[in-house]
Image (spheres, rainbow, N blue to C red):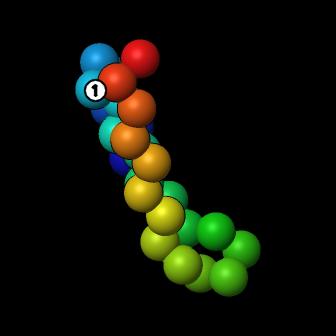
Amino acid sequence: VSLHGGQVMSWRNDRGEELLFTSSK
């Protein structure tokens, strides 16, 4: 999921863990 504006992205890495990245730029 990628939302531009607040730019919140969540994804799973190669180990199957869910990663969450947030940026305000």
Q: Quadrant of residue 20?
A: bottom left
State the SS at label 1.
loop
Q: Quadrant of residue 12?
A: bottom right
Quick one: 25 or 3, which is closer to the camera?
A: 25
**Whole-percent x and y of residue 1?**
38, 46
Residue ranking furthest to the right: 14
Quick one: 24 or 3, which is closer to the camera?
A: 24
13 lies left or right of 4: right
16 lies left or right of 24: right
Tag 1: Cα neighbours inside 10 Å, few (<14), some, or many (≥20)? few
Residue ranking furthest to the left: 6
**Whole-percent x and y of residue 9?**
42, 45
Quick check: 4 above or below 1?
Answer: above
| Residue kind at label 1, given as amino acid type | Gly
Query: Which residue does the numbered mark 1 point to in the structure image?
Result: 6
Residue ranking furthest to the front: 24
9 lies left or right of 3: right
Q: Quadrant of residue 5?
A: top left
Q: Quadrant of the C terminus?
A: top left
**Whole-percent x and y of residue 11?**
50, 59
Number of numbered discs present? 1
6 lies left or right of 16: left
The residue under the point 71% across, 74% down is 14
Quick check: 3 above or below 12?
Answer: above
The residue under the point 68% across, 82% down is 15
The residue under the point 34% across, 24% down is 24
**Whole-percent x and y of residue 13?**
64, 68
Quick check: 1 above or below 13?
Answer: above
